[in-house]
Image (cartoon, coloured by chain):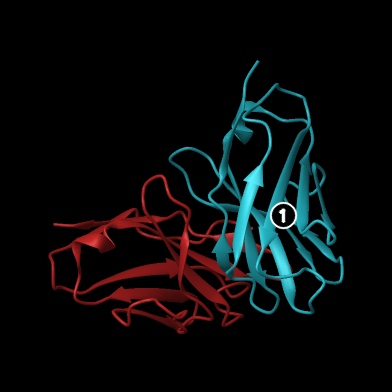
Chain colours: A cyan, B red
Amino acid sequence: QVTLRESGPALVKPTHTLTLTCTFSGFSLSTTGMCVSWIRQPPGKALEWLALIDWDDDKYYSTSLKTRLTISMDTSKNQVVLIMTDMNPVDTATYYCARTDSSSWYFDYWGQGTLVTVSS
Amino acid sequence: QSALTQPASVSGSPGQSITISCTGTSSDVGNYNYVSWYQQHPGKAPKLMIYDVINRPSGVSNRFSGSKSGNTASLTISGLQAEDEADYYCSSYTSSNTIFGGGTKLTVL
């Protein structure tokens, strides 16, 4: 059974750095073909893909946010971490992690999401 | 990349069929058979309904089907049921990125 769970702060101050952790089970990022993505959704708005890391530790980022994002993995802990710098109120959103297909990048299992509010 | 274009809303009566379109460009939808569709109920995480344009994951009703023509992909839901009322998002792979549509709110009348 595949499960993913996001964790991190609910409130972040403007200009500060956000660190989110995705803890998963039911698959291993050491297995060829496995990937995990981060996706966010501002309140009442559409989904936005942020970053992907694959089993070979290759990393891919949203073109518009790549200067602010870092994705990494700890295969021993079954965790993927997303760091987003210079947070702004427009970054207020629910952040999801999702297992991702390595060929066509569809997201077959999602975490429940974690709401991050950026406010002073 | 710009978001894929979806109608803001569609509606239908129980038992009817509806289609949601998702228009991209020759760089994304038109260039790859890597379109996926997601259903999202309020307050819930998205759920994969269709992948690679036409494929249904195990457990998804066969009332859901996908297709593509040129730069436009479509999701069709037949035999509408009250539980189908939700937001629907399309997504397309494009050159080491993924873009989503703006979402479509489906109302079952």
Of B72 and A70, nearer the camera is: A70
Of A3 and B43, nearer the camera is: A3
Give the chain of mark 1.
Answer: A
Residue drawn at the location 45% of the way across and 81% of the way down: B58
Q: Position of residue A58 (x, y in %)?
A: 85, 66
Describe residue B14's horizontal placement relative to residue B36 as left or right.
Answer: left
Describe residue B16's horizontal placement relative to residue A111 as left or right.
Answer: left
Residue drawn at the location 12% of the way across and 64% of the way down: B13
Q: Position of residue A104 (x, y in %)?
A: 64, 77
Reading the image, the residue beneath label 1 is A62
The image shows residue B100, relative to residue B92, as above or below, that is: above
Residue drawn at the location 82% of the way across and 44% of the way down: A67
Question: Around disc 1, counting alpha carbons within 10 Å, would you say few (fewer than 14), some (14 to 19), or many (20 or more)?
Answer: some
Q: Amino acid at mark 1?
A: Ser
Hey, which residue is sitting farthest top in the picture?
A120
Residue A102 quadrant? bottom right
Describe residue A35's horizontal placement relative to residue B50 as left or right.
Answer: right
Q: Position of residue A107 (x, y in %)?
A: 58, 67
The image shows residue A68, relative to residue B39, as above or below, that is: above
Residue drawn at the location 37% of the way across and 74% of the way down: B75
Q: Position of residue B72 (x, y in %)?
A: 45, 75
Local SS, label 1: loop
Residue A25 quadrant? bottom right
